[in-house]
């Protein structure tokens, strides 16, 4: 069975639970296949947690862990801690929830900056340094973080360094009335996540990740990606521009999207379709741009229109 068939089965399984959001489902799955992490920022009740649980349930053999971020959460609650064994009088390391395949960091902006930063090394380097020892994070290690964009009481805004660790930032939004009626029908007796059967094995997901890295990405498109990201630097409305990590993320996510489309190469249109999700959250607007009503996503859209597409 081809990798495109595996991708289609996985996407179909998750979409059967998260109704009315086919584009977001594909982008989040592409983010996972690219080896990155996603930040879901949307209003309460729009399906952020359901999406994370559906992805975990659709992958047979994947370990899923959830951390509810609160102001009193400590870094050791995420990374793990060594505990003295009274029988052997030796310290034994108890790994935290970060040692998993899929980690749901629910309401991540409710934890203190110190606790938020505990994820920086793990997300950026797939390792965790705990009590002076390095621990590698094997497997998928896909972080799905959620936050509420309208509630500010008792929250701590994510620092720019952590925002840069997220490959993509996506929003779900409200579904159509017809889809909402279907959601009510789905949950009349039980939650559809509980009935969801796995659509792909953990090994097949790793094969998808390997296949994405082999998708053809031409030299012209590399220059196009660098030009697109580089245009944020020196922009009059941008105080903090996108880093080279944004260019790398844009290339990898585009390759993963090509796998879901069954393509053997990346097209400029594919890059443009995910550019805002990859670049916008890494940008910090200048104060005068904020007051004038500018948005990072609008700026990225303008850059896409202004930069010539390679032919």
Image (cartoon, grey):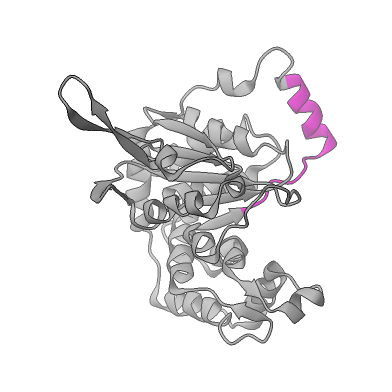
Left or right of 107 in this view: 265: left
Question: Which residue is at 76% across, 20% downward?
Answer: 185
Question: Which residue is at 64% across, 43% downward?
Answer: 22
Outermost residue toward the top in this view: 189
Question: Which residue is at 39% across, 30% downward?
Answer: 63
**Is residue 171 within the magenta segment?**
yes
Res. 174 in view:
yes
Quarter-of-image position of residue 12: top right
Outermost residue toward the right in this view: 177
Expressed as whole percent of the image width and height from the top left, the position of residue 155 reads 66, 50
Question: Which residue is at 61% across, 62% downward?
Answer: 273
Expressed as whole percent of the image width and height from the top left, the position of residue 48 reads 63, 39
What residue span does the magenta drawing correspond to?
170-185
Res. 1 in view:
no
Q: Nearer the viewer, residue 141 or 277?
A: 141
Expressed as whole percent of the image width and height from the top left, the position of residue 266 reads 46, 63
**Is residue 34 within the magenta segment?**
no
């Amino acid at each position: 069975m081809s990798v495109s068939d595996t991708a289609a089965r996985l996407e179909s399984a998750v979409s059967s639970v998260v109704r009315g959001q086919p584009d977001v489902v594909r982008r989040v799955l592409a983010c996972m296949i690219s080896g990155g992490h996603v930040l879901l920022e949307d209003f309460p009740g729009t399906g952020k947690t359901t999406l994370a649980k559906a992805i975990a349930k659709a992958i047979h053999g994947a370990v899923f862990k959830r951390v509810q971020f609160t102001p009193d959460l400590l870094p050791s609650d995420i990374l793990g801690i060594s505990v003295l064994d009274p029988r052997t009088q030796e310290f034994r390391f108890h790994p935290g929830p970060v040692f998993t395949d899929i980690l749901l960091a629910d309401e991540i902006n409710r934890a203190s900056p110190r606790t938020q930063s505990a994820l920086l090394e793990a997300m950026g380097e797939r390792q965790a340094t705990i009590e002076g020892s390095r621990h590698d994070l094997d497997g998928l290690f896909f972080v799905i973080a959620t936050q509420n964009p309208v509630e500010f009481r008792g929250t701590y805004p994510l620092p720019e360094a952590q925002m840069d660790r997220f490959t993509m930032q996506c929003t779900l939004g409200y579904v159509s009335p017809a889809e909402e009626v279907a959601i009510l029908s789905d949950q009349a007796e039980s939650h559809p996540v509980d009935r969801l059967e796995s659509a792909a094995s953990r090994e097949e997901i790793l094969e998808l990740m390997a296949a994405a890295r082999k998708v053809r990405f031409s030299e012209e498109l590399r220059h196009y990606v660098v030009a697109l990201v580089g245009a944020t630097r020196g922009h009059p409305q941008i105080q903090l521009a996108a880093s080279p990590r944004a260019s790398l993320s844009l290339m990898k996510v585009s390759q993963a999207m090509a796998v879901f489309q069954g393509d053997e190469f990346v097209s400029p249109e594919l890059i443009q379709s995910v550019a805002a999700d990859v670049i916008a959250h890494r940008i910090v607007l200048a104060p005068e741009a904020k007051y004038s009503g500018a948005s990072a996503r609008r700026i990225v859209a303008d850059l896409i229109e202004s930069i010539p597409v390679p032919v």
